[in-house]
Image (spheres, rainbow, N blue to C red):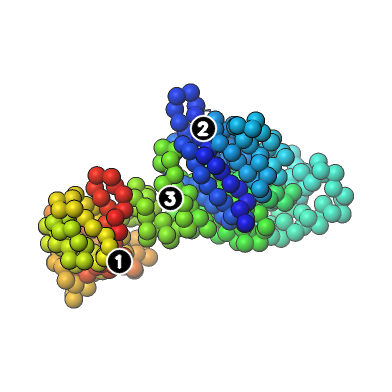
Amino acid sequence: MPKIHLEHITKRFGRSVAVDNLDLVIGDREFVTLLGPSGCGKTTTLRMIAGLETPTEGDIYIDDRCVFSSERGIDISPDKRDVGFLFQNYALWPHMTVYKNIAFGLENMKWEKKRIESRVRELLEMLRIEELRDRYPSELSGGQQQRVAIARTLATGPKILFMDEPLSNLDAKLRMEMRTELKRLHAETDSTFVYVTHDQLEAMTLSSKICLLKEGLLQQFAPPLEVYHQPTNLFVADFVGSPNINILEVTGENVNLDEIKLNHKLLKLLFTPVSSSITVQEGQQLLLGIRPEDIVLSPEGTVAGSIYSTLPSGMETIVKIDLGGQILTSVVFGSVDFAMGEKVRLSFQSDKNVLFDKKSERTIA
Ligand code: ATP
């Protein structure tokens, strides 16, 4: 069942287009992340759904109810959209205890004292902060404060929870911890989450679906692994994944990919077409995308190269390999140590690689 439905949503600021004709259907209880580089329109999109920003054109529906329509002159205020917010600066009220901070919204809604108490207890438990209930914000760590802020947002049980870079003020370790908490929390509540980040790893690990934007235009809206393995274009392929996808330039010499002959002598080894119906033109400039984990270093490998550099981090080692002037990145689990210039052999998971048209940058196969 759709929870949120955007139809032809456009937002212009003066002459510049922040969001360009966006169509989006977000299902009930989904965890959707708006992802993309700075200035691509993530925050503007979130703010328009929440009712904090007025679209220039288009319609927005929440639970099949029209909450915004440029043509019909409908614009329901944020407080009547049954939504909650969690932003980067989640300032807690410093003069209130954790308990009071969480209870505040419910007191405003004139809930009975007993009901408030039981709701706050439930939230303290859910976020595992029971022991902090009588502390003041100044007595909490960054991560603890963040949990209290989440509890406060969830207290009134909003149907939709909007989060704009809520973890960006936390250090790397805490951020990781809070990601786990957010994912757990999403499973435990009935709310639909709409999350903004420019961090592809955060989007990959948290979301049920990623909405990837570039310059206000939707690039792909799909589950994280689909975005990763079946990107719609070169931009998407390059934006997700760390280290970045390897890109090789190749030229088509035959029209049928079944018997494709390409000038790059490696291509046969690197690419197995999934469908034989795909064709490339003679002389068509192509790009081949290979994920680092699909390059395997083994003595039985079919291609010879030499070590360009080795970057060990304990859990994994990033190995850069020189293939006749072309540097490829591979990731090896655990620690490996190679000498610079050492000869190695590689094999490829050729059925996982992606072929793009160089000119349009669109995915061919
Ligand atoms: P970031 O990751 O940097 O926060 P974003 O993807 O969230 O970026 P938005 O904040 O949605 O991007 O901005 C999209 C575009 O709209 C940008 O070019 C921005 O400069 C412009 N923009 C946003 N708000 C306004 C405004 N109030 N007035 C004029 N231009 C704006």
Whole-angstrom CA distance, mark 1 to mark 3, is 20 Å
Quadrant for the N terminus in the image: bottom right
Q: Which mark is residue 52?
A: none
Q: Is mark 2 within 8 Å of ligand 1?
A: yes
Residue wearing tag 1? 274
The residue that appears at 17% across and 66% down in the rendered structure is: 259
- Number of numbered discs: 3
Label 2, on which residue? 11
- Please state the horizontal and vertical placement of residue 290, each as a whole percent of the image: 27, 59
Q: Which is nearer the N-term, disc 2 or disc 1?
A: 2
Q: Is residue 290 visible?
A: no
Q: Nearer the viewer, mark 2 or mark 1?
A: 1
- Asked whether the residues under the numbered discs 3 and 2 touch, taking CB atoms below 8 Å apart as contact, a structural biologist would say no
The tag earlier along the polypeptide, 3 or 2, is 2
User: Please, which residue is most extreme toward the bottom here?
Assistant: 300
10 Å neighbourhood of mark 1: few (<14), some, or many (≥20)?
A: some
Left or right side of 188 for 164 = left
**In the rendered image, which quarter is residue 277 located in?**
bottom left
Depth order, front residue of 125/130: 125
Q: CA distance from mark 3 to mark 2?
A: 19 Å
Residue 291 located left or right of residue 185:
left
Rendered position, 53 above or below 350: above
Secondary structure beneath dot 3 equals: strand
Rate crowding at label 3 as few (under 14), some (14 to 19) or many (20 or more) other CA atoms within 10 Å. some
Q: Quadrant of residue 308?
A: bottom left
Query: Regarding mark 1 in the picture, which secondary structure is present there?
Result: loop
Residue in view at x 47 percent, y 33 percent: 18
The answer, for residue 184, to whether it is visible in the render is yes
Q: Which residue is mark 3?
A: 220
**Could you say where residue 37 lies in the image, as x and y percent from the top left?**
41, 41
